[in-house]
Amino acid sequence: MLRFIVRRLLLLVPILLGLSILVFVFIRALPGSPAESLLGERATPEAIAQVREQYGLDDPIYIQYAKYLETTVAEFDLGVSIVSRRDVTAELKERFPATVELALAAMLFSVGLGIPLGFFAAKRYGGIVDHTSLVASLIGISIPIFFLALVLKYVFAVRLGWFPSVGRIDVLIDLEPRTNFYVIDAIIARDWTALRDVLEHLVLPAVALGSIPLAIVARITRAAVLDVQNEDYVRTARAKGLSPRIVDSRHVLRNALLPVSTIIGLQTGLLLSGAVLTETVFARPGMGTWLTDAIFNRDYPVLQAGILFLSIVFVLVNLVVDISYAIINPRIRYSS
Amino acid sequence: MSVAELESREIQLEAPSGLGSEAWRRLRRNPGAIIGFIFVLAFVFAAVFAPLIAPYGPLDQAKAGILDTQSPSADYWFGLDELGRDEFSRVIYGARYSLLIGVVSVAVGLSIGLLLGAIAGYVGGFIDSLIMRVMDIMLSVPGLLLAIGIVAALGQGLWQIMVAVGVTNIPIFARLLRGSVLAQRESDFVLAARAVGVRRRVILASHILPNAISPVIVQGTLALATAIIDVAGLGFLGLGPQDPATPEWGTMLAGSDRYLQSAPYLAIIPGLAIVVSVLGFNLIGDGLREALDPKLRGRS
């Protein structure tokens, strides 16, 4: 087990190095000189000279790369945003929790609803629940996230007025941002009005973002339950007279959840990409709106940092999924 | 009829049906795939014959003097958009963009990905490791983000989003074909071909690739669906065609947000157009997967 984890961690090194090279090359592939890209069009000659010095832009390319690694990795200095003139790291600390909050809420929605849905579809195999869920999940994966988000916004915010349509929190509510996870901040401050408001702002984006994973989770759960149901050990458990409920929960669902857990990990990339679009529709100040604004403003330090950071998160989440998969699946645990 | 003719007839009758014809037979019996075909045919038909179907040009104001939205009516089936242009005509013309962008971007990803995957799988060794590590790195950036990065580097525009979405498809196809080639390389019929002295190139071209290609066909169809969604997503973010008047579905949706209160149909109609075309490709892809699955061969 330990060997497996160490091996996976070692495999991470070339991937992260490769990622940094990709982003490094990306900044140098942009039109204009990297110093101008990093400082914006209105940079003073002094500032350009300073950046050239800091990143060693007059040095050979491999020294430039080493310096780049040193500033981003060792000092965690991601530069200064061209637009806001603030440290990119500081902005990242505000934006990232917003996206994580949204992604977690979406995940909760998709897993909390998808597993029972898939399970009952499999239990009533061929029945009306099964057919409906199959059709619904097929339509689910064919709907663009932003379209679903727009429809939800129109029906539940614009028409019915049940939920707010934009932002993370009502502008009139004053909440001290400590962690920038507003849900946690509200709980720390024991401000229940704020908590309620934050959750209300979270519902529609989370449902929009979680619907496609929901469709996928339900489909995979259904297939896995159908597979496991015919296994010998399930028949043995039934034959020895265990109650159907215990067989379902201990023998069927537990084993069926193995493939489901991998799928949940694979959905992280989709959630991160989808968050970009969902945040745009609901005007939530997260990573997504940060990055799209950065494109329009040619704010390359932000783009570089944002893409690198989200990719690292994606890689790490997949690592955690792999490891936890090995922990819950005895077949992998014992074979390594 | 001569004996020889009779014999040849019988041989023809007994000839085993190929994978292709059998798959086609199974595909025709799959109601989902039929619906998918209908959707996709309607989509392609709209794209090809747009000028004949659409009552107005995509940029024309349908009614002189009207510079405002108008709800759907008998004259304007899907209503008028904020500049008084016929929404129905714009959606029909939009099919051209989505089809073109989808096909081109999948073709880019497919051709480069297949080449890399086939080389990696068949040559093996250092080249294999090198190609696949690069693919791993590309896959470690979430798809849409990679596309956003590429568009940021190339600038906004139609061909830029095609390239961006195409590049995100490369590692998917490379991995798929490599795995497929690796699996076929060790199979008995390749061993048999090698044993009777068939040349390497011939083995790859006529024994391995034809058998490795069916997952690629399935993935290609599904990738078309994803490409249409991704391209619309980039268009929605405003990274698509520079001219906001271009009737690209994602770009149309982006503009509709401001009129959600007064003219929700401006969001719903292009959105439904995307859903229908994507659903069509997904249904065909699913049908193909079942039809081409060698485990299901012979059953029908």
Image (spheres, rainbow, N blue to C red):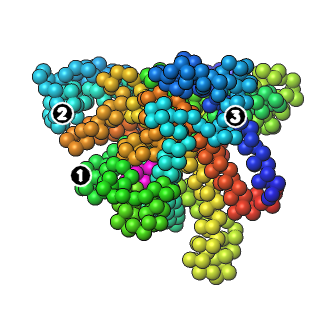
Instruction: Name the front one of labels 3 and 1.
Output: 3
Q: Secondary structure at mark 3?
A: helix
Where residue A147 sits, quadrant-wise, is top left
Percent across and percent down for residue A91 are: 50, 43
Q: Amino acid at mark 3?
A: Leu
Where residue B67 sits, quadrant-wise, is top left
Residue drawn 48% across the image and 54% down it = A180
Asked whether the beta carbons under mark 1 and mark 2 sit within 8 Å of each other, the answer is no
Residue position marked by numbered label 1 in the rendering: A159
Residue drawn 31% across the image and 50% down it = A165
Count of picture labels? 3
Residue drawn 13% across the image and 26% down it = B66
Task: State which chain disc 2 sits on.
Answer: B
Where residue B125 sits, quadrant-wise, is top right
Give the distance between the C-alpha atoms of the residues marked 2 and 3, in whole angstroms.
53 Å
Is residue B188 visible to us here?
A: yes
Percent across and percent down for residue B12 are: 64, 28
Rate crowding at label 2 as few (under 14), some (14 to 19) or many (20 or more) other CA atoms within 10 Å.
some
Instruction: Name the front one of labels 2 and 3.
Output: 3
Is residue B145 visible to us here?
A: no
- In this rendering, the answer to whether A282 lies above or below B180 is below
Could you say which is closer to the camera, residue B139 or residue A275? A275
Give the distance between the C-alpha atoms of the residues marked 3 and 1, in whole angstroms.
51 Å
A139 relative position to B123: left or right: left
- In this rendering, the answer to whether A116 lies above or below A137 is below
Residue position marked by numbered label 2 in the rendering: B69
Q: Give the magenta part as a residue range.
A: A204-211
